Image: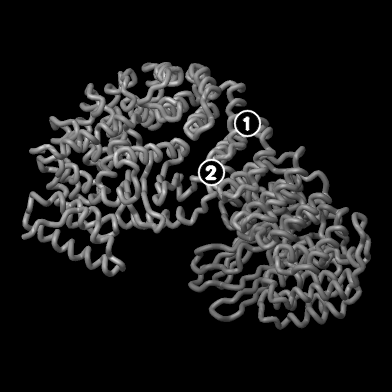
Amino acid sequence: MPAPIRLRELIRTIRTARTQAEEREMIQKECAAIRSSFREEDNTYRCRNVAKLLYMHMLGYPAHFGQLECLKLIASQKFTDKRIGYLGAMLLLDERQDVHLLMTNCIKNDLNHSTQYVQGLALCTLGCMGSSEMCRDLAGEVEKLLKTSNSYLRKKAALCAVHVIRKVPELMEMFLPATKNLLSEKNHGVLHTSVVLLTEMCERSPDMLAHFRKNEKLVPQLVRILKNLIMSGYSPEHDVSGISDPFLQVRILRLLRILGKNDDDSSEAMNDILAQVATNTETSKNVGNAILYETVLTIMDIKSESGLRVLAINILGRFLLNNDKNIRYVALTSLLKTVQTDHNAVQRHRSTIVDCLKDLDVSIKRRAMELSFALVNGNNIRGMMKELLYFLDSCDPEFKADCASGVFLAAEKYAPSKRWHIDTIMRVLTTAGSYVRDDSVPNLIQLITNSVEMHAYTVQRLYKALLDDISQQPLVQVASWCIGEYGDLLVSGQCEEEEPIQVTEDEVLDVLEGLLVSNLSTPVTRGYALTAIMKLSTRFSSVNRIKKVVSIYGSSIDVELQQRAVEYNALFKKYDHMRSALLERMPIMEKTASNGPTEIVQTNGETEPSVVEPKHPPPVTLPTNQGTDLLDLLGGNDMALAIPNTVPTKPASAGGELLDLLGDLSLSGGPAPTPAPSVPTSQPSFLLDGLSSQPLFNDIAAAGIPPIIAYNKNGLKIDFTFERANPNPNIAVITIHASNTTETDMTDFVFQAAVPKTFQLQLLSPSSNVVPALNQGTVTQVIRVLNPQKQQLRMRIKLTYTHRGSAVQDLAEVNNFPPQSWQ
Amino acid sequence: MMQFMLLFSRQGKLRLQKWYVPLSDKEKKKITRELVQTVLARKPKMCSFLEWRDLKIVYKRYASLYFCCAIEDQDNELITLEIIHRYVELLDKYFGSVCELDIIFNFEKAYFILDEFLLGGEAQETSKKNVLKAIEQADLLQESRGM
């Protein structure tokens, strides 16, 4: 059998292959040869063969049949064999396969070998890929070697110990005695690895940390070593661009950070050396900056004096001006971490940060954007917003959504004037309109509603924007809604802020109808448009045109549109006397919590925005606004219902009759099923997730009013639970819980209620309209009843649903209200 | 600690892979493929750091080879650049003006050098001289008879 070809020969041959197929052929041939050689148990060439196998493995070919051969090589007496054997083990063996355990004995022997290079191989392999079992078996040997005076072995043993501790944390204790005089070594390799070992121990165990702080007096030792490194003259062995052993300096600084965190004494002891490093380190090369970077991180994390902190931030500020983009990146990341705690110091570097928005690197841009938003305040809002809007115009699509949300949030917090706010929103909608998050639409609508004096201006600007471009859905939706609300202001040409435009009712209707037919409009947008057209029926005089449009859509294939159209039609016909009340101008909406759906929160460089928690603490503490109680209880992060104070003052002609007959219409004015943002149903999941969790309400109801069974027939049971958590004793809040004991679901479930004339009723949206079978869930819905005359509460309810394929309808009276619910 | 180091050419061919965390072959291949693609797609003007999964990737190109390291959140990116540079210097000293071909034909030596410089994802020796001395001695041991 001829000698197997040499490694380099094989490499050369394989590299001549011109195609993947040719290479594969060569490899297969060689693998076959190697396999037969292995079968022959050839000791002489095993090493060569395994080396070749490792090469082929790197090219991506399977090499598992070489695993056992590696073990044989490790067990060999020849150093060459061991070298390749251990390398093969590290590349081919996997701690998940039991075969790796066969290594343990060899490693044990080699750890005690007479030649330090063999011991080194064993330590290296154990420290790189030792499994927990191996670590448990061999920890004792490692610990022994940690105490040797041979620095070549000691440094390796230290890192091996680190690996053992990572794999089997309980073994940490046994290495403690050996660490006693590690730092008195002169050898930098040992020092470096010792610091790594001490760092690992301190990070893992608070007890160890306390021990090293107090008993071992680690801080003074580290300070001394660091001082020597800085003060000592040129040392050729450890010099990197004029700095002595930067690797060791950085690790010491990192360990100091852990020791100084939350500890006044330690922090004080390291104050001077940190200041020294911060001021004396050469910044012209990357090495120096690496040390400064670590220093800054340490200063910011420990209990340092304010002077030192300012020094640190200034270093970061200088980093921002560095030509090296890596340094700028690192600076922005660090500033993002410190902006909350040292806000004012970071503010000083605001203009540099804003300049970074124009950087070419994506990561730098993102960090600069996050940092910019964090720095916006009442004083710099105008300037910052200009920069950020410019950024929004020109940035990559991946940034636009976050940037738009950030702009909205900042504008909301710090807008210097309502007009500025509206203009800013307009700018965002027109430039990044399609990237704006869907839930910004209701927020914007609320904002616009509440800026009463700007209505004419807003609707005019939105109308003009629509004329230009109807492709950006959020813009179109907000615009449609506004035109529906304020169309009368638009045609009357009464705008104070800018030159009023001349537009006729027909032109407005043209635009809205255009939205309905355009291919660019999403179904949601069409819904907005149709509702807007409907609303204009009370504001415009061209009612007939509107009637025609509405009736056309009564047969639309879009179910949502069809339903709306049909209902609006009904409004024209049977309920025409109510139309004007229903379609009245929206009242001012109260906000319960910050509506910003996202806030860009910096989290160690992570770039995903996180959801803002509602600013008000959920449930118990109630705001003065009684109408928002409900939503607060749910940690409501949507707008509240407008009604509370306006409830009793609604004119009887609009309120009373309306609600008697059509109890499922809410007071806020739009027809109920619309997902128009005026009613919280635009966010059904948030609101109603809370609603459908019964326990919450049961707790509240436990305030004394017993629940009742209002209806129980044909498998459908409806419970009423009561609540009087709000300050107004005239309002009873009833929650219905509909459950279904039959084996089939009840779908299209609609609950309607009517009350006698002296009461007023408000029905909020249900949690769903499917009552699942076999009590697997309930549909809940909230009814608010105003009972100023404290009369006995009576209610007529109407239930409609589909069950087992057929439509069911039932009427019932509820007379068993407990006295506490209306007294 | 460093979780892994990859060396690959501009065509995406792997020249060295050192893993300090246990992963299956399949996972290693997947990670390698993904990272190589990501790094090769970067433009020269971009910085040497990128976030990838929950790790920080530090990469630098030396001639035709990309040196790519994955470090953890606590690690210092700038000093990792120095670690990469130190490794290149070691290779350079050992091979004498090292080029990609040296690493292709002597990959096992490249591993031996790396294993004298780093252990378990951390630097074990900060003196260039000491690392090279150890390699020299080990090479001698390899050549001498009986060992």
Q: Mark 1 points at which residue?
A: A342
Q: Residue at x 63, y 44 (%)?
A: A356
Q: Give amino acid for label 1.
A: Asp
Residue A735 at x, y percent in the picture: 65, 57
Considering only order in the chain, which callout, 2 or 1, is on the residue closer to the N terminus?
Answer: 1
Residue A699 at x, y percent in the picture: 59, 48
Separation (CA) of disc 1 from disc 2: 18 Å
Q: Can residue A726 be seen in this view?
A: no
Label 1: how many Cα within 10 Å (few below 14, some 14–19, many 20+): some
Q: Which chain carries label 2?
A: A
- Element type at marker 2? loop
Q: Which residue lies furthest to the front in this view?
A: B97
Q: Name the residue under label 2.
A: A605
Q: Mark 1 lies on which chain?
A: A
- Tell me whether marks 1 and 2 sit on the same chain: yes
Say whether residue A217 is left or right of residue A553. left
- Quadrant for the N terminus of chain A in the image: bottom left
Say whether residue B27 is left or right of residue A290. left
Query: Would you place residue A211 above or below residue A536 in this image?
Result: above
Label 2: how many Cα within 10 Å (few below 14, some 14–19, many 20+): some
Residue A738 at x, y percent in the picture: 59, 64
Residue A576 at x, y percent in the picture: 85, 75
Q: Check residue B97 in the rendering and tell me which mark sits there, or answer none.
A: none
Q: Give amino acid for label 2.
A: Gly
